[in-house]
Amino acid sequence: SENIMELSDGDFVKNISGHLSQNNIIEYIVMISQQSIVGRFGVAKPTQKQFNFDIDEDEIPICLYGSLITIKDSKRELSYIEQLGFEISRDKNFEKGNELI
């Protein structure tokens, strides 16, 4: 089954965290939007290293991009996020105490 995280107009990803394998492949990822929509993808394991990307309150993510790696074993084929990147811009209209627009 496909995991989906749907956001409404005006909402955007505000925090990304997850777990990396020993080979630095993202095996578990959690995305939280500004309006608190949560998407969880993959499987967390105790042997994984944790990571966290925060987007500051005066920043707006413009683009989220990455690449996948496919690993086959005897039973199935799995895709993992191998690289993850962001293009982030400052909100020129942001003032402390006000929400992002």
Image: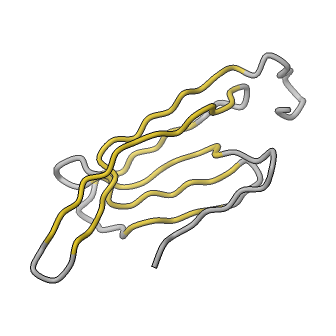
Q: Nearer the viewer, residue 100 or 70?
A: 70
Rendered position, 3 above or below 88: below
Between residue 91 and residue 74, name the one nearer to us: 74
> Could you say where residue 79 lies in the image, as x and y percent from the top left?
30, 62
Q: Is residue 3 above or below residue 8?
A: below
Q: Position of residue 28 (x, y in %)?
A: 38, 61
Q: Residue at x 47, y 50 (%)?
A: 17
Quadrant hosting residue 57: top right
What is the x, y in percent for residue 99? Answer: 86, 34
Foreground residue, 85 or 99? 85
Question: What residue is drawn where x is 17% and y is 49%?
Answer: 23
Quarter of the figure with the N terminus: bottom left
Q: Residue furthest right?
A: 98
Q: Is residue 70 above or below residue 52?
A: below
Rendered image quadrant of residue 67 = top left
Front residue (pair 59, 2): 2
Left/right of residue 46 with respect to residue 73 in the rendered view? right
Q: How is the image coloured?
A: secondary structure
- Locate the C terminus and report the quarter of the image it occupies: top right
Q: Is residue 16 left or right of residue 83?
A: right
